Image (tube, rainbow, N blue to C red):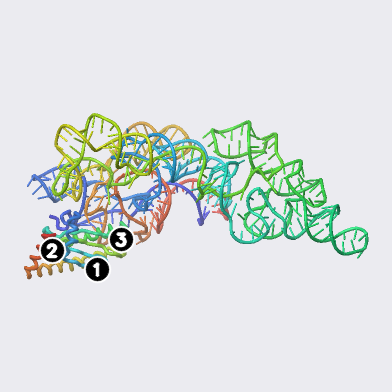
Amino acid sequence: MNHYGFPRQVRLLSAEDYRNVFNDVTCKVSNRHMLLLARESNTQHARVGLVVAKKNVRKAVERNRFKRLVRDSFRLHQHTFEPLDIVVLSRPGLSDLDNQTIIKQLENLWQRLNKRAIDNKQKSSSKPHQANNQQKVKNNG
RNA sequence: UGAGUUCGCCAGGCAGUCGCUAUCUAUGCAAGUAGGUGGAGGAAAGUCCGGGCUCCAUAGGGUAGAGUGCCAGGUAACGCCUGGGGGGUGCGAGCCUACGGCUAGUGCAGCAGAGAGUAUACCGCCUAAGCAGCUUCGGUUGCCGGUAAGGGUGAAAUGGUGCGGUAAGAGCGCACCGCAUGACUGGUAACAGUUCAUGGCGAUGGUAAACCCCACUCGGAGCAAGACCAAAUAGGGAUCCAUUGGUGCGACCCGCACUGGAUCCGGGUAGGUUGCUUGAGGUAUGCGGUGACGCAUAUCCCAGAUGAAUGACUGUCCACGACAGAACCCGGCUUAUCGGCGAACUCACUUU
């Protein structure tokens, strides 16, 4: 088993996967240039998906660059994550940053996201009533 | 050596580590794993033209509408390219050119100016026949009249120069130049001409990216085209026969299809598969052509993703790396672009 691969299992593939995340966001982390949304995954590992709007990043080259950096950063950090479905969104001004700063910011955001996910887990385990409610919502949606 | 013109080519290299994708081989029941090989551009861009391909009807006739616009050729086709002609521009190599028709018709033209299209009499020039005034009786001034040579206005004032001619002038006449028309010669043609004849030239001003006329071209929609598999949902769908009425075919008409009856049973939204890369293909050589390009032979297979691959990091070298990312595929055009290299040619200067 390769520890730092990026196969199809760790990506969000269909429109349905994305819809699930957007409809039921449990963790939300952002800075000036990007926004991360996440919810608990149905799988045993973390998965990632990308939404880069043409409005925010005008040039195709820049969009590709950002996507590649996110994928690479995720690939290298994937085993530190809780099992989450994560969507990374772009914000305006992203194309002005160089590779180094984007990677640094991503590492920071990964950590914050992970921490929040763990906090949520502890909360739900300490209050089983609330956890049941969440379970119900999931089943309905 | 410097300045410039045209054409062509390249688009950081090398090594290591970790990845992605397609494919081949090995292994495995399978998921996969290991190894090999391929993996963005000259513009992939804008979507401005032209094709292929697919469906609509097998896209046929006419009208409307749109496009193109010197000539010839190339091409699958073009609004592209090549060669040639005319015009403009540069000392030159070259570059630019929306370059059919206003002697078919209709329309348009600010300011200035007397007059701007059936041209015009403001100043000036001429005239003393007629009328009127003045008069030293010679004339002179005004009206009437002639005149487009001179001034002035304008982007533009209806051939130019010279001589004759005249009251002053005028193609009014003549010579030369220009122009037009018709021959002739050369050229496939556009067109050209130290050629000939005819015309005095207020013929025939400009504007057609003004309507328009002429010639030629064009059916529409697009890979989210279309085909197949197929949860859900709805109750229809396919084939044959018949051709009065109704509906549809996305400019309109002609025209064509469907609706009716009989027989048969599947239907098709989410999602998936396919279309999807072997092609008007590249490279080399030879032949034909001024050239665009064509033909022949040999050889090569050179991205095919689909939440969307072709990257990140480190080291190193140097000229310190621009514009920028395929999405059905080609041919162009246009726009963006750090720089580097090569070839041919032009001009200037120096040396021999």
Crowdedness of circle 2 by 10 Å Cα count: few (<14), some, many (20+)? Answer: some
Q: Kindly identify which residue carries mark 2.
A: A82
Q: Toward which corner of the image does residue A87 lie, by quadrant?
A: bottom left
Tell me: B193 left or right of B211.
right
Tell me: B134 left or right of B214.
right
User: Which label was assigned to residue A55?
Assistant: 3
Q: Kindly identify which residue carries mark 1.
A: A31
Q: Where is residue B98 in the image (x, y as percent from the top left)?
A: 51, 47
Q: Residue at x 20, y 55 (%)?
A: A15
Mark 2 or mark 1: whose residue is earlier in sequence:
1
Q: Mark 1 lies on which chain?
A: A
Is disc 2 in contact with disc 3, using a CB cutoff of under 8 Å? Answer: no
Foreground residue, B243 or B202? B243
How far apart in space, not on screen, are marks 2 and 1 (Cα)? 21 Å
Q: Which residue is drawn at 30% across and 56% down?
A: A60
Under mark 1, the amino acid is Asn
Crowdedness of circle 3 by 10 Å Cα count: few (<14), some, many (20+)? Answer: few
